Image: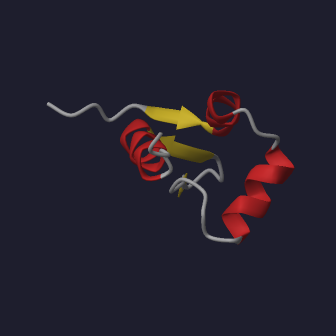
Amino acid sequence: MASHKMLKLPEVLTEIGMSRAAFYRMRARGTAPKLIKLPNGQIRCRRSDLDAWWAEHEMCA
């Protein structure tokens, strides 16, 4: 069964090594990982969406 783990925004920022401001600039350009806004206003990212984003941005050596 696929993992449905949801990451909080600070966890995502730590993993990708980026400031919140830089992340939101990337999001405005449409190049950030897919996010989900919960009814209480909190932001989450599915682990699978972040992994897909990493795979999409891998550079072939």
Q: Quadrant of residue 35?
A: bottom right
* Horizontal and vertical percent position of residue 23: 74, 51
Is 10 situated left or right of 6 in this image?
Answer: right
Using the image, determine if residue 13 lies above or below residue 32.
above
Most extreme residue toward the left, as rendered? 1
Q: Quadrant of the N terminus?
A: top left
Most extreme residue toward the bottom, as rendered? 29
**Total labels drawn:** 0
Q: Nearer the viewer, residue 42 or 40?
A: 42
Using the image, determine if residue 16 lies above or below residue 41.
above
* Horizontal and vertical percent position of residue 11: 63, 29
Using the image, determine if residue 60 lies above or below residue 1.
below
* Horizontal and vertical percent position of residue 43: 62, 48
Most extreme residue toward the front, as rendered? 61
Q: Nearer the viewer, residue 3 or 39?
A: 3
Q: Quadrant of residue 9?
A: top right
Is 9 situated left or right of 5 in this image?
Answer: right
- At horizontal 71% and vertical 60% (from top left) the residue drawn is 26
* Horizontal and vertical percent position of residue 39: 55, 55
Q: Which color scheme is applied?
A: secondary structure
- At horizontal 41% and vertical 45% (from top left) the residue drawn is 55
- At horizontal 62% and vertical 35% (from top left) the residue drawn is 12
Is 33 situated left or right of 6 in this image?
Answer: right
Using the image, determine if residue 19 lies above or below residue 15.
below
